[in-house]
C-alpha cells in the first residue's frame, strides 16, 4: 500500500485514529507502571476532548477512506462527536466512582476508549465487514466492563449473561450478513441499499434483513430481544451502565440508520412492518414493566427499552424528518441517561446500595443540588418542555405522522404519559416525602469532575431544548 495514501486515510478518520492511539498509550502506561489511574484518567480526558473537537472540525468534509470501507466527515463525524462527548462525561463521572468501588485500575480507561473506537467504526462503516468489526470491538469491551466489579456476584452475572446472549445475537448478525452478500453480491452498504427495491422479492434477501435486524434489536435493547437489559444494567458498574445505555445504543442506531436506510425501509415493506411491531412492543413492554420497579437502575433499564421503541418510530418513518429526529433524540438521550446514571453513581454506596426509590426520599433537603439535577433528567426523560427530551419525541412522532404511521405516534404519546408516573414518582419522593428517622444519611464524596459532568449534561439538555436548531442545523444535511 502507498504510504502517502495510508497516511491520508489515517488522518481522514482522525477521531478514530486519535482514540485508538490514546487507548494504546493508556494500556502501555498501565502495563509498565503501577498506580497509573490518575494519569490514565487525565490522558483519556484530554484525548476524548481532542477527538470531540476534531470530529466537529471534520464535520463539513465528507468522503470515504480505506478503499471505500469507512465514511469520513458528515454523518460519521457527527456520531464521533456524540460518542466522544458520552465518553468524556463517563470518564469524568468514573474517576471518583471506581475509587469508591475499589476498582480503580488503569485498564478501565483503556477498555472504555476501545469501546468508543468500536462505536465510531460502526457509525462510519460503509461495508458490513467494517460494521461487524466495530460492533464486536464495542461488545467485547462492554462484556469486560460489565464484570469489572469482580468481587460482586451481580457484576459477574451481568458479564456472563451479556456475553452469552451477545454471542448468540452475533451469530444471527453474521448469518444475516452472509445472506445479504449472497443475494446482493456485495457487502458494500450503499450498494445493498441501492438494490433493495429489486431484491425486495428475494427470499434470501428478506431472511438476511430479518437476521440482521435480530442482531441490531439485541444491541438497541428492543423487544423481544430485551431480557438481558435489566440484569446487566443492574449488575454492571453504574457508570458503565450509563455508558452502555447511551453510547452503545447510539452506535447501534447509527448502524441501523445506515443499513436500514430510508430508501431500504420504504422499498422493502416487510422490513417496515416488522420494525413497526418491534417499536410498538418496545414502547408498551418497557413502560408498563418500569412502573413496577423498586430499583432506579432497573427502572432506567426498562425505560431504555421504551426509548428504543420511540427512536425506532423515527427509523420507520423513513423520511428526512424522522431520520433527523432519530439523531436529535440520540443526542438528547445521551445527555439524559448519562446524567441520571451519574447521579446514581454519585449516591451509590461501596456495597452497591442507595439505588432504590425509597433511598431518595427527602433528597432535596439533604442534597438539593443533586435533587435538582436528577429532577431535570427525569423531566427530560418524560418529555416535558423546555428540555431536549420533548423535542426528541416531537420530531420522531412528527416524522411518523408525515409517513402515515399516525397510530404509532399516538401509541408513543400514550406511552410517554404512562412513563410520567415512574419518572415523576422519583421527583415526588425527592421533594415531597420525608426521609425515615432510622434511615442512614447518604454520604456523598466530593468530586469536582463528576459534578461538572452532571451540570454540563443538564445545561446541554436545557440549551438544546430551548435552541434545538443548534443540533438540527448540523444534521439537516445528512438526510
Image (cartoon, grey):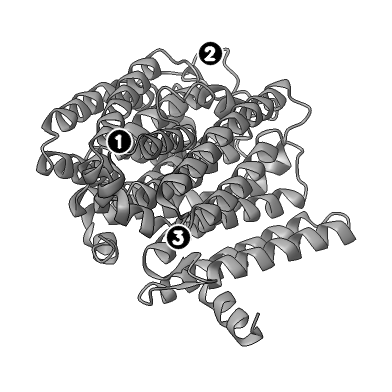
Of the numbered discs in the image, which one, if any, rests on residue 437?
A: 2
Q: Is residue 265 above or below residue 355?
A: below
**Residue 366, how many percent across, how many down?**
49, 31
- State left or right for residue 129 relative to residue 99: left
Quadrant of the rendered image containing residue 220: top left
Of labels 2 and 3, earlier in sequence is 3
Residue at 20% from the left image edge and 46% from the top image edge = 395
Mark 2: few/some/many CA within 10 Å (<14, 14-19, 20+): few
Of labels 2 and 1, earlier in sequence is 1
In the picture, which quadrant includes the N terminus? bottom right
For the residues labelled 2 and 1, the Cα–Cα distance comes to 56 Å
Circle 3 — which element? Answer: loop
Of the numbered discs in the image, which one, if any, rests on residue 271?
A: 1
Circle 1 — which element? Answer: helix
For the residues labelled 2 and 3, the Cα–Cα distance comes to 59 Å
**Residue 183, how many percent across, how many down?**
41, 45
Residue 354 seen by the camera:
yes
Of the numbered discs in the image, which one, if any, rests on residue 126?
A: 3
Residue 92 seen by the camera:
no
**Residue 64, how many percent across, how many down?**
45, 72
- Front one among 260 and 104: 260
- Front one among 384 and 233: 233
- Front one among 421 and 12: 12
Q: Is residue 285 above or below residue 10?
A: above
Amino acid at each position: 500500500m502507498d504510504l502517502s495514501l495510508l497516511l491520508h486515510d489515517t488522518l481522514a478518520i482522525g477521531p478514530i485514529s486519535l482514540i485508538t492511539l490514546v487507548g494504546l498509550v493508556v494500556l502501555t502506561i498501565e502495563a509498565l507502571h503501577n498506580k497509573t489511574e490518575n494519569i490514565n484518567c487525565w490522558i483519556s480526558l484530554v484525548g476524548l476532548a481532542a477527538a470531540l473537537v476534531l470530529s466537529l472540525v471534520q464535520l463539513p468534509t465528507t468522503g470515504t477512506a480505506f478503499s471505500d470501507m469507512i465514511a469520513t466527515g458528515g454523518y460519521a463525524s457527527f456520531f464521533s462527536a456524540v460518542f466522544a462527548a458520552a465518553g468524556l462525561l463517563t470518564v469524568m463521572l468514573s474517576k471518583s466512582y471506581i475509587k469508591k468501588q475499589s476498582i480503580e485500575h488503569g485498564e478501565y480507561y483503556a477498555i472504555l476508549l476501545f469501546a468508543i473506537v468500536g462505536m465510531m467504526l460502526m457509525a462510519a462503516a460503509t461495508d458490513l465487514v467494517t460494521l461487524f468489526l466495530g460492533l464486536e470491538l464495542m461488545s467485547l469491551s462492554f462484556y469486560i466492563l460489565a464484570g469489572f466489579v469482580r468481587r460482586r456476584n451481580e457484576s459477574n452475572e451481568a458479564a456472563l449473561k451479556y456475553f452469552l446472549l451477545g454471542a448468540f445475537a452475533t451469530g444471527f448478525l453474521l448469518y444475516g450478513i452472509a445472506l445479504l452478500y449472497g443475494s446482493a453480491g456485495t457487502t458494500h452498504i450503499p450498494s445493498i441499499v441501492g438494490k433493495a427495491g429489486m431484491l425486495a422479492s428475494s427470499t434470501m434477501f428478506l431472511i438476511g434483513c430479518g437476521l440482521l435486524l435480530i442482531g441490531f434489536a439485541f444491541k438497541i435493547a428492543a423487544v423481544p430481544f430485551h431480557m438481558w437489559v435489566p440484569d446487566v444494567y443492574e449488575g454492571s458498574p453504574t457508570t458503565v451502565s450509563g455508558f452502555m445505555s447511551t453510547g452503545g445504543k447510539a452506535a447501534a442506531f447509527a448502524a441501523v440508520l445506515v443499513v436500514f436506510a430510508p430508501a431500504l425501509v420504504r422499498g422493502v415493506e416487510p422490513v417496515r412492518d416488522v420494525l413497526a411491531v418491534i417499536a410498538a412492543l418496545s414502547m408498551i413492554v418497557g413502560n408498563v414493566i418500569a412502573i413496577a420497579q423498586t430499583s432506579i437502575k432497573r427502572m432506567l433499564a426498562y425505560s431504555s427499552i421504551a426509548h428504543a421503541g420511540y427512536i425506532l418510530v423515527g427509523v420507520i418513518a423513513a423520511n428526512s424528518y424522522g431520520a433527523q429526529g432519530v439523531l436529535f433524540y440520540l443526542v438528547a438521550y445521551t445527555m439524559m441517561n448519562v446524567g441520571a446514571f451519574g447521579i446514581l453513581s454519585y449516591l451509590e454506596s461501596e456495597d452497591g446500595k442507595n439505588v432504590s426509590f425509597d433511598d431518595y426520599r427527602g433528597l432535596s433537603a439533604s442534597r438539593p443540588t443533586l435533587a435538582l439535577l436528577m429532577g431535570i433528567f427525569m423531566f427530560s426523560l418524560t418529555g416535558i418542555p423546555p428540555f431536549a427530551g420533548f423535542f426528541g419525541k416531537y420530531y420522531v412522532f412528527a416524522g411518523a405522522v408525515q409517513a402515515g404511521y399516525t397510530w404509532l405516534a399516538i401509541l408513543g404519546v400514550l406511552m410517554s404519559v404512562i412513563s410520567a408516573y415512574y419518572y415523576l414518582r422519583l421527583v415526588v419522593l425527592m421533594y415531597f416525602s420525608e426521609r425515615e428517622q432510622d434511615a442512614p444519611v447518604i454520604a456523598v464524596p466530593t468530586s469536582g469532575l463528576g459534578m461538572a459532568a452532571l451540570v454540563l449534561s443538564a445545561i446541554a439538555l436545557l440549551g438544546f431544548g430551548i435552541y434545538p436548531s443548534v443540533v438540527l442545523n448540523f444534521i439537516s444535511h445528512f438526510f
